[in-house]
Amino acid sequence: MDQGKILGQLALNFGLISLIAFGGASAALPEMHRMVVDLNHWMDSTTFTHLFALAQAAPGPNVMVVTLIGWQVAGFMGAVVATVAMVLPAFCLTYTVSRLLPRWGSKSWYRLAERGLAPVTVGLVLASAFLLTKTTSDSIGTILITIAAVLYILVAKKNPLHILALGALLGAFGVI
């Protein structure tokens, strides 16, 4: 496939994804995964997960995963096209809605739509968590660590960095 066609696909797909990414780029991970791994076969699930992990470890916005995917798929131009396609449509939509908010903010349909987006966002984030768990939990050890991490965060209500550090230590010593 030629570079121009790949760049066009990146622009179209990430442009559309940006409009459904309520909750940020991380909320749209399942659709990104479907696009780059399942449909176009530009990378495998492991590479996709590694790019996501790298984007999360680096300082900066969560949308960095899109830049890394674009870079992996089509080099520098892929990174630029994917990032612009992910940011520009969402920016335009947000700007337009914010300009119309004074006129629409008091309307009942607007408040209803606004409240309806909260469960959509939660669902998208949970789908992303499921995708990452499914991709990375390839042994009984990683599955148990994932379950323990979720329980620790939900029950203990402590900083999740504690469990992340424990997982890193277990990985460094070859336990998982």
Image (cartoon, rainbow, N blue to C red):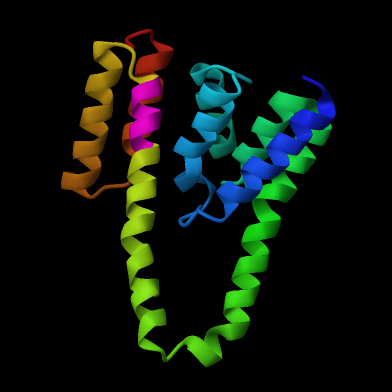
Determine the residue positioned at 67% across, 54% down: 87
Determine the residue positioned at 58% across, 84% down: 100
Residue situated in front as seen by the camera: 56 or 77? 77
Q: Is residue 15 above or below residue 9?
A: below
Main SS, magenta residues: helix
Residue 139 visible, this orientation: yes
Could you tell me which quadrant the N terminus lies in? top right
Residue 160 visible, this orientation: no
Determine the residue positioned at 40% across, 30% down: 132
Residue situated in front as seen by the camera: 49 or 113? 113
Residue situated in front as seen by the camera: 62 or 155? 62
Q: Is residue 22 above or below residue 17?
A: below
Determine the residue positioned at 35% across, 86% down: 108
Q: Is residue 150 left or right of residue 33?
A: left
Question: Residue 81, percent across and down?
Answer: 77, 42
Q: Would you say residue 46 sits in the magenta stretch?
A: no
Q: Would you say residue 134 sits in the magenta stretch?
A: yes
Q: Residue furthest top?
A: 174
Question: Residue 54, percent across and down?
Answer: 58, 31
Could you tell me which quadrant the C terminus lies in? top left
- Disc tally is 0
Where is residue 117, by image quadrant? bottom left
Q: Residue furthest left?
A: 155
Q: Which residues are magenta?
A: 129-135
Q: Is residue 108 above or below residue 56?
A: below
Q: Is residue 149 left or right of residue 31?
A: left
Residue situated in front as seen by the camera: 152 or 98? 98
Q: Is residue 51 above or below residue 31?
A: above
Question: Residue 63, percent across and down?
Answer: 60, 46
Question: Residue 7, percent across and down?
Answer: 77, 34
Where is residue 51, by image quadrant? top right
Where is residue 170, by image quadrant? top left
